[in-house]
């Protein structure tokens, strides 16, 4: 389950894959009165973490914790009010447009809703090959199709599925398509925003197993965001607990479960409904 | 006489690929004050069963069998008479509080609606009662917030408002369809506790539908495990969870990621395959093909219900009704008695 | 590979619980079953056929005046009779269809092209660009369309071309608004965020993702606007500001028939019926298209 670097052999000497420092993001709220501007909404109030290559980091939080905002900042889909996000040593938000586009091959995202994250009007092949369109060296049609078939096989789908439309697939299969799309540029980091929360339990297990396998086979790192500690434990080496925009605790899943220090973490662990 | 008696409930639906049986042969009884859980994944028919209880199935659905509330047959009742029962003697709480509450009406008005409709209260009386109800479910400053709109409340609060609406007329039966799935985990516990308190207070019967084993474990006394429209296992919660006779139940348990002290050991055990579409469900056992013990007959012959354990009669005979037997469906008894994983 | 069997289990051919297993109905089959759509399509086809036919054949002549044969009732020579100048009514109706379609088609195309463009830009750029475009649309909406068209044609001179321009201008804000609203809904979807995460530019996202997903809404709106354009052209021609003589136009036929209401009431009926059927047909077509195209997007899970 643990990535190849987890044995600690490389340690701090290896380049940090992802480094976030003092991330803050405030959103201005719409005016309700003509005279004074309302307080901005502080979605993130100073989040820092480091993710070494080959390891996976879980971010656990509930609604309002800022986890979706964090995902967007790491994916450079939104600018932080303060703080930096460094991928492989480069500050993502300071890269020029071209450079950022080129850098995107190294980090991709998987979304929560399997029904909304695939364009219903495009075939699976088009959807999965979209990240290739923005690479500097665009592959030709045949090469593109071959790559698509390769990733489809990696996620457990068939070659025939490439010509079908999303509505012909179940939730779990759509999530596999989304994962295939995230894999096609051979990224180092995948930001997964609640990737299994919308799936049934048995399907969830299949997708989690798949993600584990890919992590091991391809040396992937995940930034795995979830509200469920149990799910995160399965895929991640370290976990951050996010509450109202701040990291209240961090540690290995085992530590957090057996000895949660912060009251919020304790509440989270307690509240998870347990089977007798 | 039991409050709710469902016998051989069968529902046929029109899907985009033809007509198929969505729910087949579901039977259960529910006493006053008892709690029943329906557990299963998407497409198992649990929501359809709940909608059938209230007569809210889509028009093209054909329903067979019998649903009796206090001896009165509900299937085939005219819409007018069903409306008189809904909100009054049986109520439902839905999964998505934002879409179940009307965004353009104040919450006071929505909670008062069943009161005015069924109990004939005047506006002032209904408002007063609505305030009481909202306070009971834990909405702070209910009196001042009566005219606020749903979007001004959080998800947990909206769910509480829905519960207040459902309880307004003091129904005998409350059906809760995944009431906490859309909510945060910390809020979920509080809502479920609230439901338990209210059920005890009003001695209502509760039908709780969920896909979450943990939620079911802690909140209902008896349960039905559904797959492919059939009840594959049923009985008292403790018994079912302890024995886990049916392979699907075992698979469900095994597939849950567990928060535990020991590190996760590689792959989560999964149930092979995926739920087939309704029209592709086999005529025999719905689980055929995915079950590790499948044999050829399984596809063709519907599995009979086998009683695995008949609880001995406890001393007070009045409670005898409550001890539901542990029943599971399988063609081969040895599959059921093989013993569950710990 | 173990992952293959994880998602699919090969099963033997077994009997199922379904009463009937059919393939899901395709769009063509559903269309044929939808009453509004079929009726609307027939009427619209009739309209187009009439216009096309008029290029090669008309029962009589729409232009030749024959004072001896003025105001005749329907006969074997003149199927619908003749008007005050002896022109064949049936032929005029057929040729008049040309004007209606031409105005409708071109005006709606102007509105569609410019309106959709503005709407897409507004949704993609947001901020002050969106504000400006929407305020301009609001400003244009503030003017009652028909009166403004009348004013424009009165100022710049009557004629089909000016009528087309006038009607076209007032189609632009309609399409702009509806495009922006639908496009905004698409921009908020996860698959657009996924495209942004791939590094797609706003233009690429607009063309690849937004436009195909709002196309059905635009098609429905276009048929509705077509119907309105036909009505507008009829109104302008009625006032003498649209299609000029000797080109026949249904609206002008109505105006000419007005003074003769008691002598030959049918003169007003036929063009009126033609206008009504065309508008009805297009509206039904639009309704039918909306029903057929939308449910596909809200498919049950």
Image (cartoon, coloured by chain):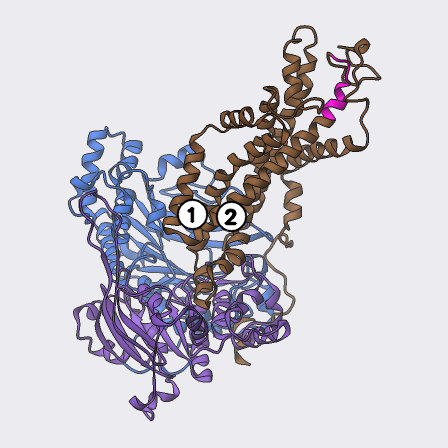
Chain colours: A purple, B blue, C brown
Residue B174 in view (yes/no)? yes
Name the mark on residue C12: none
Residue C141 percent location from the top left of the image: 44, 33
Q: Nearer the viewer, residue B24 or C230?
A: C230
Q: Quick one: C288 or C24, which is closer to the camera?
A: C288
Q: Say which residue appears at 34% left-offset and 71% top-offset.
A: A94
Check disc 2: other Cα within 10 Å, few if <14, some if 14-19, many if 20+. Answer: some
User: Up-down: is C88 above or below C288?
Assistant: above
Residue B51 is labelled as 1
Q: Main secondary structure of the magenta part?
A: helix
Q: Quadrant of residue B85?
A: top left
View extreme (bottom): residue: A9
Q: Residue B238's x, y, as percent? A: 31, 66
- Determine whether, in the image, residue B337 is placed left or right of residue A44: right
Residue B107: % across, % down: 26, 40
Q: Is residue A128 magenta?
A: no
Q: Is residue C87 magenta?
A: yes
Residue that badge 2 annotates: C117
Q: Which residue range is magenta in the image?
A: C85-94
Q: The residue tagged with tag 2: helix, strand or loop?
A: helix
Q: Residues within 10 Å of mark 1 (few under 14, many from 20)?
A: some
């Amino acid at each position: 389950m643990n990535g190849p670097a987890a044995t600690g052999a490389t340690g701090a000497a290896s380049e940090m894959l992802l480094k976030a420092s003092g991330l803050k993001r405030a959103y201005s709220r719409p005016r309700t009165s003509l005279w004074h501007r309302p307080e901005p909404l502080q979605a993130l109030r100073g989040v820092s973490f480091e993710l070494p290559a080959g390891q996976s980091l879980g971010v656990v939080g509930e609604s309002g914790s800022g986890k979706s905002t964090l995902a967007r900042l790491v994916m450079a889909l939104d600018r932080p009010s303060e703080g930096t996000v460094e991928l492989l040593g480069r500050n993502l938000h300071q890269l020029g447009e071209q450079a950022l586009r080129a850098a995107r091959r190294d980090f991709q995202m998987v979304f929560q809703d399997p029904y909304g994250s695939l364009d219903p009007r495009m075939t699976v092949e088009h959807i999965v090959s979209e990240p290739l369109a923005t690479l500097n060296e665009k592959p030709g049609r045949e090469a593109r199709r071959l790559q698509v078939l390769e990733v489809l096989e990696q996620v457990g789908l068939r070659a025939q599925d490439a010509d079908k439309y999303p509505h012909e697939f179940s939730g779990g299969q759509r999530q596999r398509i989304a994962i295939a799309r995230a894999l096609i540029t051979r990224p180092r980091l995948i930001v997964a925003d609640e990737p299994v929360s919308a799936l049934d339990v048995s399907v969830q297990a299949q997708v989690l197993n798949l993600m584990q396998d890919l992590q091991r086979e391809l040396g992937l790192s995940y930034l795995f965001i979830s509200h469920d500690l149990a799910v995160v434990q399965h895929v991640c080496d370290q976990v951050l607990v996010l509450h109202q925009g701040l990291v209240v605790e961090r540690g290995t899943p085992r530590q957090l479960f057996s000895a949660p220090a912060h009251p919020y973490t304790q509440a989270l662990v307690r509240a998870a409904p347990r089977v007798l | 006489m039991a409050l709710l008696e469902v016998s051989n409930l069968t529902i046929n639906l029109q899907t985009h690929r033809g007509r198929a049986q969505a729910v087949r042969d579901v039977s259960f009884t529910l006493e006053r004050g008892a709690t029943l859980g329906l557990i299963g994944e998407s497409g198992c028919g649990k929501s359809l069963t709940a909608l059938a209880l209230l007569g809210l199935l889509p028009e093209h659905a054909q329903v067979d069998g019998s649903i009796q509330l206090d001896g009165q047959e509900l299937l085939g009742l005219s819409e007018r008479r069903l409306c008189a029962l809904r909100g009054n003697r049986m109520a439902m709480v839905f999964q998505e509080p934002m879409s179940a509450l009307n965004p353009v009406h104040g919450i006071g008005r929505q909670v008062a609606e069943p009161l005015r409709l069924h109990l004939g209260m005047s506006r002032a009386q209904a408002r007063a009662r609505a305030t009481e109800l909202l306070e009971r479910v834990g909405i702070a400053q209910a009196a001042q917030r009566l005219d606020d709109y749903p979007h001004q409340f959080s998800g947990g609060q909206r769910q509480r408002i829905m519960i207040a609406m459902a309880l307004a007329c003091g129904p005998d039966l409350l059906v809760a369809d995944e009431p906490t799935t859309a909510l945060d985990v910390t809020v979920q516990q509080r809502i479920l506790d609230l439901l338990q308190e209210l059920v005890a207070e009003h001695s209502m019967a509760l039908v709780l539908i969920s896909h979450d084993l943990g939620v079911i474990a802690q909140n209902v006394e008896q349960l039905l495990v559904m797959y492919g429209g059939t009840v594959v296992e049923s009985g008292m919660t403790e018994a079912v969870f302890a024995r886990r006779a049916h392979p699907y139940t075992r698979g469900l348990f095994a597939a849950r990621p567990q928060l535990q002290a020991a590190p996760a050991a590689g792959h989560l055990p999964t149930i092979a395959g995926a739920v087939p579409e309704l029209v592709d469900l086999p005529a025999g056992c719905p689980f055929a093909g995915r079950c590790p013990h499948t044999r050829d007959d399984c596809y063709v012959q519907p599995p009979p219900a086998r009683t695995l354990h008949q609880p001995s009669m406890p001393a007070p005979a009045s409670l005898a009704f409550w001890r539901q037997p542990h029943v599971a469906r399988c063609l081969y008894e040895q599959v059921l008695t093989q013993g569950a994983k710990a | 590979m173990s992952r293959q069997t994880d998602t699919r289990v090969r099963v033997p051919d077994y009997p199922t619980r379904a009463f009937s297993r059919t393939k899901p109905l395709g769009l063509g089959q559903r269309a044929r079953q939808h009453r509004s759509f079929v009726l609307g399509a027939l009427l619209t086809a009739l309209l187009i056929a009439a216009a096309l036919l008029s290029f090669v054949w008309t029962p009589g002549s729409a232009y030749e005046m024959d004072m001896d044969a003025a105001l005749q009732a329907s006969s074997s020579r003149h199927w619908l009779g003749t008007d005050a100048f002896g022109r064949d009514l049936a032929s005029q109706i057929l040729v008049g269809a040309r004007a209606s379609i031409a105005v409708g088609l071109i005006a709606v195309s102007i509105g569609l092209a410019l309106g959709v463009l503005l709407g897409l830009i507004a949704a993609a750029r947001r901020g002050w660009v969106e504000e400006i475009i929407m305020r301009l649309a609001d400003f244009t909406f503030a003017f009652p369309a028909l009166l403004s068209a009348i004013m424009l044609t009165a100022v710049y001179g009557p004629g089909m071309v000016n009528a087309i321009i006038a009607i076209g201008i007032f189609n632009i804000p309609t399409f702009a608004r509806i495009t922006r609203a639908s496009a905004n809904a698409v921009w908020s979807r996860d698959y657009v965020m996924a495209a942004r995460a791939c590094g797609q530019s706003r233009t690429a996202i607009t063309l690849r993702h937004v436009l195909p997903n709002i196309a059905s809404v635009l098609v429905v709106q276009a048929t509705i606007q077509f119907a309105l354009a036909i009505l507008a052209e009829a109104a302008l021609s009625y006032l003498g500001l649209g299609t000029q003589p000797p080109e026949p136009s249904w609206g002008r036929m109505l105006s000419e028939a007005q003074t003769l209401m008691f002598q030959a009431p049918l003169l007003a009926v036929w063009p009126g019926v033609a206008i009504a059927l065309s508008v009805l047909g297009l509206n039904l077509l639009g309704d039918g298209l909306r029903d057929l195209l939308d449910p596909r997007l809200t498919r049950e899970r």
